[in-house]
Structure formats: C-alpha cells, structure tokens
Image (tube, grey):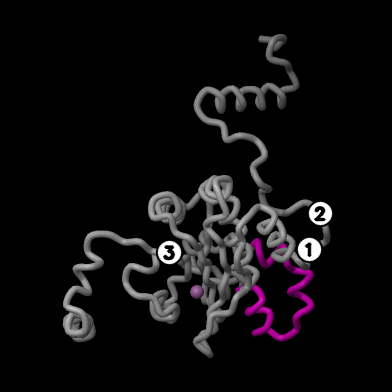
Amino acid sequence: MENFRKIIQHNREWAAAMKAEDPDYFEKRASRQEPHFLYIGCSDSRVPANVVTGTEPGELFVHRNIANVVLPSDLNVMSVLQYAVEVLDVKHVIVTGHYNCGGVKAAMGNQSYGLVDLWLQPIRNVVRWNKPELEQIEDEQARFDRVVELNVLEQLYHLSETPVIQNAWEKGKRPLLHGLVYDIHEGLLREIATGVDSQEAADALAQRRQSGVPAGPPPVMGRLTQPVLAGDALADAIAQRVMDRLNVTGGSAKR
Ligand code: CO
C-alpha cells in the first residue's frame, strides 16, 4: 500500500510542477488531442513510450501489448489503429520492439506459460519461418536479438496489410510506417525499417523479414486480391466453395 500511495503522491507533485512552469499546461490539452504518432510497443515496464521518445502528453497515441504483436484478429489493436489513422489522422505509425523481450524469449522456448502461449503464437511462427537464418547464429543472445528484430518486421508487415493502412495509402502517402527496436542496455532506439509508405515498400519489407527463407510464396497470408465479402455475397461464396468441394455444380446437384 505504501508504494501505491507513492504513486498518488508523485502525481500531485508532478501536476504541481507542470502548472508552476506553465499555468495552462493541462487546460491547453484538455479539450482535444492531435498526436502525430501512433506508437505500438511492448507492455514491458522498462520501455515507457513517452519517456524513451521524449514526447509530451498529447503527442503520442499508444497501444501496448506483450511483445508488440499486430494481429488483424485483435479487436483492440485494430480499433486503436483505425481511430488513430482515420480520426486522429496520425502521420506515423511506429512499431517498437525491444531487446531482451520476455515475450519473444518465451516464444523461442518450449516451456508453457498458459494463456499467453496463444498470444505468442505469431512469434513462434517468426522463429519457424526464419529457422535457416537463425540456425546460422551461434551466439544465443545474438539469435535472441535477431528474433526481436524479425518480430518487428513481421508485425510491421501485418500492419501494412490491414484494410486501415491499405485504404489510407490508396488516398495518399500517409501514414508512414516505422519499425524500431529499443536497446534496454543503452536506452537507444534503433531504426529497423523507416518510411514505409506504399505497398512496394511493404513488399520489400516482406523480403527482409524472411531473409533466411528460400525464395517462394510468402508463408503468411498474402495481400488481399479479392474484395472482402460480407452478407449475401459471403454466404453465396461459402455455399459455392462447399459445392465445389462436393464436386458438384450449382445447377446439377443431386439431391
Ligand atoms: Co517485451
């Protein structure tokens, strides 16, 4: 309880100090936010988004989860992304991983951690797809570091494939996507990929993220080439697929 009280106490001191410096500090920010950046990072307590990027309240829209995973099936990150891009009109989306990431380490090992194993599955895939490259790295820490970097590239690519980013790029060259890795030993952000602003740039990224994999089709879902189906069109498409599998045509199905 004592530690918790400290948090409240520090908050009072901080608010007072900010007001002493600028009496309108909070009022100026109270009515609206106009952040230029969406930051997607790891929940790790050693990587505080505002602190390591030197940003003030109001400058960074933030989403954090274990090991900075970006999945289209995650309603949370997708909602944050949509709001940031379509409503707040952020200019940059930054995926930030960090060395010595516990989530990445867990995904590299065989130990089970319960529910979180499901969450880490995409990183297990990164490890699997890049096995040829990773097996060449003898030093354990260097291999760990490389998986952290590959994970950032992978999540950045996932980001590029989302309808939100695809739609935004169709209208212009924004937002720019960036991949960073935070070095917790040095306190420095390393640029892994910067200024991804088009499908071509994202495709180049895809090559890099599977550099150890022999040439061939990407192991993950490719870019959507078909329109997304919904409602009756989706029902028809599913029915058609079932019919195809049963090897009958729509008109001559035997009943
Ligand atoms: Co982490």
- Secondary structure beneath label 2: loop
| Residue 91 pos. (x, y %) | 48, 60
The residue identified by callout 1 is 213
The residue at 60%/75% (across/down) is: 191
Which of pointers 2 and 3 indicates the residue nearer the eye? 3
Q: Who is closer to the viewer here, 17 or 235?
A: 17
- Is residue 203 located in the magenta-colored stretch of the structure? no
Task: Indicate the amino acid at tag 3.
Answer: His
The residue at 43%/49% (across/down) is: 86
CA separation in Å, label 2 and label 1: 8 Å
Quadrant the C terminus occupies: top right
Task: Indicate the amino acid at tag 1.
Answer: Val
Q: Are marks 2 and 1 in contact (CB under 8 Å)?
A: yes
The residue identified by callout 3 is 36
State the image quarter where residue 105 is shown: bottom right
Q: Who is closer to the viewer here, 88 or 133?
A: 88
The residue at 39%/80% (across/down) is: 51
- Secondary structure beneath label 1: loop
Quadrant the N terminus occupies: bottom left
In the rendered structure, which segment of residues is drawn in magenta? 125-148
The residue identified by callout 2 is 216
Which of pointers 3 and 1 indicates the residue nearer the eye? 3
| Residue 58 pos. (x, y %) | 33, 67
| Main SS category, magenta section | helix
Precedes in sequence: disc 3 or disc 1: 3
- Secondary structure beneath label 3: loop
Examine the rendered structure and indicate whether residue 249 appears above or below residue 159.
Answer: above
State the image quarter where residue 227 is shown: top right
Q: Are marks 3 and 1 in contact (CB under 8 Å)?
A: no
Task: Indicate the amino acid at tag 2.
Answer: Gly
| Residue 229 pos. (x, y %) | 56, 31
Residue 12 — which label? Answer: none
